[in-house]
Image (spheres, rainbow, N blue to C red):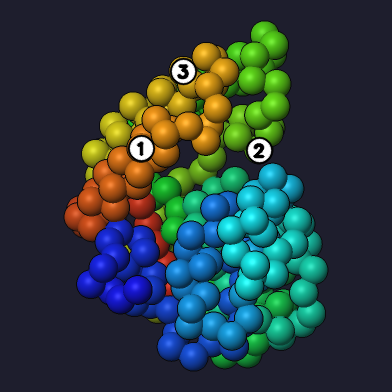
């Protein structure tokens, strides 16, 4: 798949991905879409997630990716063994950011790189639909006996970062080389509609593999990609980074 066929984060990170990486590790691989896409430029691909369900889903879709269920704060990889580490919308959820970055530094080769995206401390940070709306609702609902199978991972508020915050966090491990700000409020509005319908489907006990949910997911992906491709500088909704390991 070429750059001209892609949009949003997929286009940006494929453009940033080194042409010849021997190994790629995606932390918080989820559906494995980005891992599969970026991994086409890598000989070995590894997907890591804390949720066993995501690992099982990934294995059923991609038999040429090696999966492991583990925490990003305790990576089951040897020192200097990975060329590129990616983590998209993950850093804001980890409990110990410093330990997380130390582990990534440990497993990266001397010329290794990281690529990541996080919520930006921008103009719409106060409108983060997860933090201000869905996380409190789901937390209360679970205590009342609803959504019992939802992981506690999704019931915590997450952080927002500025480029300065990340620069401070990365010292003395990584040097930031590329920065991209994308999106504003369209993604958050789309996410409000998407998550509201998602919760409704859960309440109605409708199978998540149904056609309605697939259409809903595709629609949300297109909205997010369109929004991401419009940069509003430091006011933007998302912050994306490419950084290299400091020797």
Residue found at x 47% / y 73%: 38
Q: Is residue 246 shown above or below 198?
A: below
- SS assignment at label 1: helix
Of the residues under marks 1 and 2, which one precedes in the sequence? 2
Of the residues under marks 3 and 1, which one precedes in the sequence? 3
Q: Closer to us: mark 3 or mark 2?
A: 3
- Asked if the residue under mark 2 is in contact with the one under mark 3, i.e. CB atoms within 8 Å, the reply is no
Of the residues under marks 3 and 2, which one precedes in the sequence? 2
Percent x, y for residue 189? Answer: 29, 32
246 sits left or right of 1 in the view: right
Percent x, y for residue 136? Answer: 54, 21
113 sits left or right of 69 in the view: left
- Quadrant of the image occupied by residue 81: bottom right
Q: Tell how many labels.
A: 3
Residue found at x 69% / y 70%: 66
Spatial separation of the CA atoms under disc 3 and disc 2: 20 Å
Spatial separation of the CA atoms under disc 3 and disc 1: 15 Å
Q: Closer to us: mark 3 or mark 1?
A: 1
* The label number, if any, that marks residue 215 in the structure image: 1
Q: Quadrant of the N terminus?
A: bottom left
Q: Quadrant of the C terminus?
A: bottom right
Spatial separation of the CA atoms under disc 1 and disc 2: 26 Å
* The label number, if any, that marks residue 153 in the structure image: 2
Query: Which of these two is toward me, 126 or 107?
Result: 107
Give neighbour class at mark 2: few <14, some 14-19, many 20+ (Cα, 10 Å): few
Percent x, y for residue 181? Answer: 30, 59
* The label number, if any, that marks residue 200 in the structure image: 3
- Asked if the residue under mark 2 is in contact with the one under mark 1, i.e. CB atoms within 8 Å, the reply is no
């Amino acid at each position: 798949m070429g750059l001209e066929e892609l949009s949003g984060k997929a286009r940006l990170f494929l453009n940033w991905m080194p042409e010849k990486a021997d190994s790629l590790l995606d932390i918080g691989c989820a559906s494995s879409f980005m891992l599969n896409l970026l991994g086409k430029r890598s000989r070995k691909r590894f997907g890591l997630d804390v949720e066993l369900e995501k690992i099982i889903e990934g294995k059923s879709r991609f038999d040429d990716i090696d999966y492991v269920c583990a925490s990003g704060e305790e990576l089951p990889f040897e020192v200097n063994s990975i060329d590129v580490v990616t983590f998209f919308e993950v850093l804001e959820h980890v409990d110990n950011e410093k330990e997380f970055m130390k582990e990534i530094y440990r497993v990266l080769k001397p010329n290794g790189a990281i690529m990541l995206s996080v919520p930006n401390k921008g103009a719409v940070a106060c409108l983060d639909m997860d933090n201000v709306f869905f996380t409190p609702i789901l937390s209360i609902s679970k205590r009342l006996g609803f959504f019992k199978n939802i992981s506690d991972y999704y019931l915590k508020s997450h952080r927002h970062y500025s480029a300065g915050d990340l620069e401070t966090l990365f010292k003395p491990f990584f040097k930031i080389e590329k920065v991209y700000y994308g999106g504003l409020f369209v993604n958050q509005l789309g996410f409000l509609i998407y998550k509201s319908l998602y919760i409704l489907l859960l309440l109605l006990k409708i199978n998540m593999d149904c056609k309605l949910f697939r259409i809903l997911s595709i629609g949300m992906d297109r909205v997010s990609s369109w929004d991401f491709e419009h940069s509003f500088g430091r006011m933007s909704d998302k912050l994306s980074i490419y950084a290299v390991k400091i020797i």
